[in-house]
Amino acid sequence: MENDQSRHEPRAHQHFDAFGPDFSNSMRLTGKQWLVVGLFTLAIVLFTPSLWKQVERFELEPDYRIPHDLSNDYWFYDRWSRLAAANYDTLLIGDSVIWGEYVTRQETLSHYLNELAGEERYANLGLDGADPVALAGLVEHYAGGVTGKNVILHCNPLWMSSPRRDYQDEKYFDSSHPRLIPQFSRQIPGYKEEISHRIGVLVEERVPFNSWTSHLQTAYFGGTDIPSWTLEHPYDNPITPIVQGPPPSDETLRHLPVPWYKSGITKQGFPWIDLETSLQWRSFRRTVEILQERKNRVFVLVGPFNEHMLEPESLERFQKVKSTIVRWLEQTGVPYLAPSALKSERYGDASHPLAPGYKVLAEEVFKVSVHSARGKPGG
C-alpha cells in the first residue's frame, strides 16, 4: 500500500512545467493554411455531386421507373429526370398512377404509349405518393432539367377528396414526402416539424451536396448515415455497397392485380374539397405554371378516377370537382384529356388502373396528345 508521500508524487511519465504539458495533439494552422482547407472543402461541396455521376452506374433501360425504395431519393430523381429529358420526347410526371402501383414496369401507361409509338419516346417520371403539394416541390427543386419538352402531367383528384388528403386537418398530417412540401407555409396547419429540420430541408433543396449525401444513405446504406451503418456492420466494407451500384428499376408487383371489388374495397363516400380552398389544387396549378415557365409543352391527364367506387352523393360532388378542373384548363388554354371512367374491373382501387386499364387509357392519351401539339385540347 502506498504511503501518503508517494500518493502525492507525480508519476515518472508525467512532466509538467509552469505552462502545462510538454506536448499537445492539437495543431495550429496559419491563415493561408485555413484558406487552403476552406477552398478544398468548398471544392468538395461544389463538385463532388457532379463527379459522382461519372462514377455511379446508371444504365438506361426500356420502361425505366424509379425503384420504389428510392422514392425519397430526390438527388437520384433529379438525375433520372435530366437523363430522361435528354433521351425522350415526352415525359410523364405524376404520382403512383403514372408510376404504376398495380402493374410491372412493362404494363405502365408510358410502356403502352411507347408501344403505340413504335419506339421509346415516353419516359416514366412518376413518383409514388407525390401528391400535388409534394409534386410542386419536386418539379421546382429536382426537375430543373425538364425544359423545352413535351410533358404529360397527371392530375389525380383523389388528393382533393377529403380535408386530410388536402392537408387542412390541424391534428393530422400524413405525407409520403414531407421534405417536398413548403417548409414555412402556414397553409399546412398539421405540419409541425422543428425549425432546425425545416432549415435543413431548405438547404438540401438548394445545395446539391446535401441531397447527394442523402442519396448515398438511401441508395446504399438503408437510409442510415455511414458511421451508423459501420456500427451495425462492423465486419463489412462500406465500399462494397457503393461498388454494386444503386438498386435496379422495379420488376416486382407491389399489389396483386385484381379488381378493387375483389380485394375487399367497398364503395366510399368521399366528402370532396371545394377547389377554391384546396391546397392540393392550388399546388397543382403551380406545377403547371413552373413547367410552362421552363418552356415545356404541358398536356394534363385528369384521372380517370374510379367513379364506380363512389356512393351517389359522393359521385355527384366529384363531378363538380372534375368540372372545375376542366373549366380551369380550358380557360388557361392547357391541352388536356378528361376521359370517362374505365370499366370497373380495370381498377385496382380508387385511382389506380390495372394493366388492361392502362392499355385502353394509353390509346386515348396517344390520340389526343398528338392533336394537342397543334393546340387542340381534348375532353
Image (tube, grey):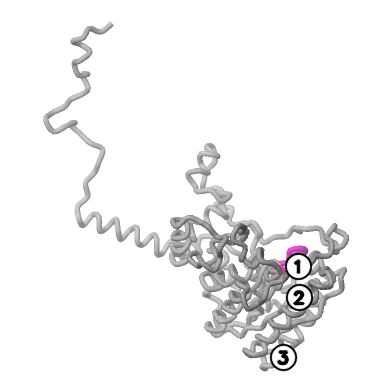
**Rendered location of residue 376, percent (x, y):** 70, 93
Q: Are marks 2 and 1 in contact (CB under 8 Å)?
A: yes
Under mark 1, the amino acid is Phe
Q: How many marks?
A: 3
Label 2: which secondary element: helix
**Rendered location of residue 239, percent (x, y):** 51, 48
Is residue 100 something one can see in this rendering?
A: yes
**Rendered location of residue 78, percent (x, y):** 54, 68
Sequence-first disc among 3 and 2:
2
Task: Write down the residue under mark 1.
Answer: 270
Task: Write down the residue under mark 3.
Answer: 371
Sequence-first disc among 2 and 1:
1
Q: Looking at the image, which is closer to me, 242 or 144?
A: 144
Q: Is residue 379 above or below residue 14?
A: below
Q: Looking at the image, which is closer to me, 2 or 157?
A: 157
Quarter holding the C terminus is: bottom right
Quarter holding the N terminus is: top left
Label 1: which secondary element: loop
Under mark 3, the amino acid is His
Q: Which residues are magenta?
A: 97-106
Q: Residue at x 62, y 89 (%)?
A: 332
**Rendered location of residue 7, percent (x, y):** 22, 13
